[in-house]
Image (tube, rainbow, N blue to C red):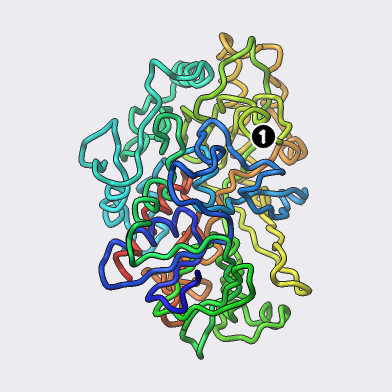
Amino acid sequence: MIPARADIVVVGGGSAGCTLAATLAGRPGRTVVLLESGPGYASTGTAPPELLDASRLPVGPESRWTAQYPVLLAGRPGTIARGRVLGGSGAVNGGYFVRGRPGDFDAWPPSWSFDHVLPYFRLIEHDSDFGDEWHGAAGPVPVSRTPWSRLHPVARAFHDAAVAAGHLPVEDLNAPGPVGVGRVPLNIANGVRMGPALSSLMPALASPNLTVCSGTRARRVVMSGAEAVGVEVDGGDGVTFIEAGSVVLCAGAVESPRLLLLSGIGPADELATLGVAPVVDLPGVGTGFTDHPEVAVPYRYRSDLPLGTAVLETVLHTDELELRPYTAPFADSVPGSGAAVPVLGVVLTRPRSRGRLIFDARDPYAAPLLDYGYLDDPRDRAALRHGVASAVHLLAAMDEVVDPHSVPTGAADVDDEWLAAHLGTSQHLSGSCRMGSDDSAVVDDRCRVHGAERLFVADTSVFPQVPSRGPHATVVMLARRVADAL
């Protein structure tokens, strides 16, 4: 049953929403409602098996656990998938739980410096490998690295090749220090993907303060003047209203800006185009987002290799690149993808190109088009070319597992057409409701929407820019910290 009122309504049951709702539910005297548009479950034992198996990502075109969005990647049309199930994309990803680097937070307001956020990184995790001042031992999210003795042959060969090429071996990628190659911190326990839905929300479901409404879509935030007073929702039996003391949007970097626009908060000209009465003119809603472009360098194995391991066990970081030796072809790890050839991913971690969300004026509730703007900046193209050349050299050195005849040696000097043809995205969309104090910022440093009252956004959309590592650990940290400010 959908409650008529709550002290706090959290919209979106992804990693941020699960973390925020679970934290708030543990505090007496405040009622919390968590809304998730996708299906839900009540325990680890009742979670769909596809969500538990960390060796497979249920994000293919026929997945029941995702929403599909149309995209433009360097002008080429395609689609991306975002998690649409309790746990969100954290329920369907590869379990990569690498923190943002200290320098990433230099672009954030001063109150979000690395020194300020480190205590919250420690609060959210239980790191079984390290017990020093950088890590937590009592948090809900289990974090560990694949033991050296169990590394997949591709992961081991890649690590050895990177060290032989002069890259620094890094024992702990979640601690400050130089860049290099190392094992990936994973939120995986005994092969189970332990995202915040399983690790944080499930234990909180017994709280009398918390109500989780899955299969319930938020249509808009209801405003009284500039004050958020509740949420209009559709739970399948018609539209109803939940009165709220505060509303926190955790719907992700696509749906949170869309909900703001449908609620009258965004660029005035776009609101007029969509036929939405303006409440707050915020030009930055849905614009200037960042994400990690990823180029897939194909090759073939020398012989059959084992399946059933984590999708990514080692990575190489440089100042602006991440090289990812995936442990299986995506045809095996992403059911329905059809991508049968193994690839080494080349990721630009500090992109300069910016994207925007394009909404359909005929139907604001339709999926928006995500125009990434990838490769617009020539410096991004140059960096990716360098990354592809590095990938080719490393693959050539991995001759115990890689068929040397399959390495695309000509890719060491690729042109724009080759980059575009092999271009994808890491699906780390960030910054569509950016945090800051300038005219294009959408929220302040407490994640309060500028010009609105009792309305917050707490997900990757508020990141000033995408971190130079995957955003999952950083968004869980953000949600945990915002919970303390509510």
Determine the secondary structure under disc 1: loop
Amino acid type for the residue under numbered disc 1: Pro
Q: Does residue 128 appear in the picture of this structure?
A: yes
**Which of 290 and 382 lies nearest the eye of the viewer?**
290
Q: Is residue 473 above or below residue 434?
A: above
Q: Quadrant of the C terminus?
A: bottom left
Estimate the x, y position of residue 214 in percent, counting from the top left: 53, 60
Q: Residue at x 38, y 65 (%)?
A: 210
The quadrant where residue 176 appears: top left
> Furthest residue to the bottom?
225
Q: Mark 1 = which residue?
A: 335
Estimate the x, y position of residue 479 in percent, counting from the top left: 39, 59
- Position of residue 79 in the picture relative to residue 167 (left or right): right
- Position of residue 432 in the picture relative to residue 31 (left or right): right
- Position of residue 241 in the picture relative to residue 407 (left or right): left
Q: Does residue 110 appear in the picture of this structure?
A: no
Q: Is residue 214 above or below residue 375?
A: below
